[in-house]
Image (cartoon, helix red, strand yellow):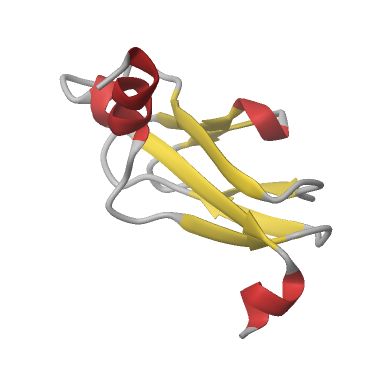
Amino acid sequence: MNSGDRTIYLLETDNLIALPLNTTVRVLVTSEDVIHSWAVPSFGVKVDAVPGRLNQVFVTPKAQGTFYGQCSEICGVNHAFMPIKVRVMNNSSFYN
């Protein structure tokens, strides 16, 4: 296993977010325990997830592929294990 494979392994998730290409999507973010921060640098997005509050961010993916992010707040002991995976696909694949 080379270092690139190890990096992707550490960013893999049990669940991913699928988004359609060239479509504006509203992402609603909240938390149930502590403040987190939903961040996907490739989209230029970072929004706080605050308990008891509903925040939103709009995303318009311009390229197909798989994009990764992480919680960018120091939110507790498992902070390093909070990856985000977003798969952007063309509209025909997304809606079928």
Residue toward you, 4 or 16 = 4
Q: Could you tell whether 75 is left or right of 45 in the image?
A: left
Q: State the quadrant of the C terminus.
A: bottom right
At a point 56% along the width and 53% down the height, the residue shown is 87
Residue 35 screen position, x and y as percent: 38, 30
Q: How many marks?
A: 0
Relative to 40, say whether 60 is above or below. below
Relative to 55, say whether 50 is above or below. above
At a point 74% along the width and 72% down the height, the residue shown is 91
Q: Could you tell whether 24 is left or right of 51 in the image?
A: right
Relative to 14, say whether 51 is above or below. above
Residue 49 screen position, x and y as percent: 46, 38
At a point 29% along the width and 28% down the height, the residue shown is 10
Specify whether residue 27 is in view. yes
Outermost residue on the front side: it is 1
Specify whether residue 54 is in view. no
